[in-house]
């Protein structure tokens, strides 16, 4: 049976105004984008993040890239507290399943 699974990731972003453009940055991943409005800059950064994650996944290097960016797996039994303050962007990462049985190491 084919299906769709969606992961979501919440990442801190910074948005600053530079003359007539807004610059949206994700320091954790060293990704940047811009837009004529604050919302457009954030939307463009969100799209850049989706493409970045999809590209890393398709090339089989997502784990390696996240580790190099300083990510660590948080324990489900001892989760981190929710972030306070600051600005975050919520990125959906959709995946399709083929429906074929495969062994997954979890």
Image (cartoon, rainbow, N blue to C red):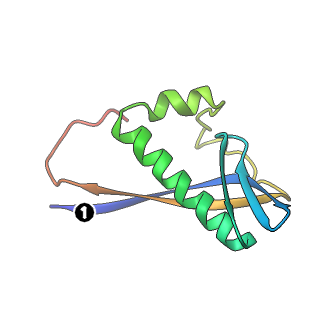
Residue 94 placement, left or right of 83: left
Instruction: Give above or below for 106 relative to 12.
Output: above
Residue matched to label 1: 3
The foreground one among 20 and 82 is 20
Q: Give the residue drawn at x 64%, y 40%.
A: 29
In this rendering, position of residue 60 left or right of residue 23? left
Instruction: Return the residue nearer the eye: 97 or 24.
Output: 24
Q: Position of residue 31 (x, y in %)?
A: 64, 45
Q: Quadrant of the N terminus?
A: bottom left
Would residue 86 appear left or right of 65 to someone viewing this image?
Answer: right
Local crowd at mark 1 within 10 Å, few (<14), some, or many (≥20)?
few
Residue drawn at (36%, 32%) of the image: 60
Q: Residue 41 lies in what quarter of the image?
A: bottom right
Q: In which quarter of the image is the C terminus?
A: top left
Name the secondary structure under disc 1.
strand
Give the percent coordinates (x, y) of residue 59.
35, 34
- The picture quadrant where one finds residue 40 is bottom right
Query: Which residue appears at 61% of the width and 67% of the height?
Result: 43
Q: In this view, does 58 lie above or below 41?
A: above
Residue 78 drawn above or below residue 34:
above
């Amino acid at each position: 049976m084919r299906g769709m699974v969606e992961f979501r990731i919440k990442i801190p972003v910074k948005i600053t105004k530079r003359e007539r453009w807004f610059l949206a940055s994700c320091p954790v991943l060293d990704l940047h984008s811009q837009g004529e409005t604050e919302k457009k800059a954030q939307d463009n950064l969100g799209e850049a993040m989706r493409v970045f994650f999809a590209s890393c996944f398709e090339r089989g290097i997502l784990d390696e890239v996240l580790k190099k960016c300083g990510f660590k797996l948080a324990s489900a039994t001892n989760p981190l507290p929710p972030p306070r303050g600051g600005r975050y962007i919520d990125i959906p990462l959709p995946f399709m399943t083929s429906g074929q049985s495969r062994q997954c190491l979890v």
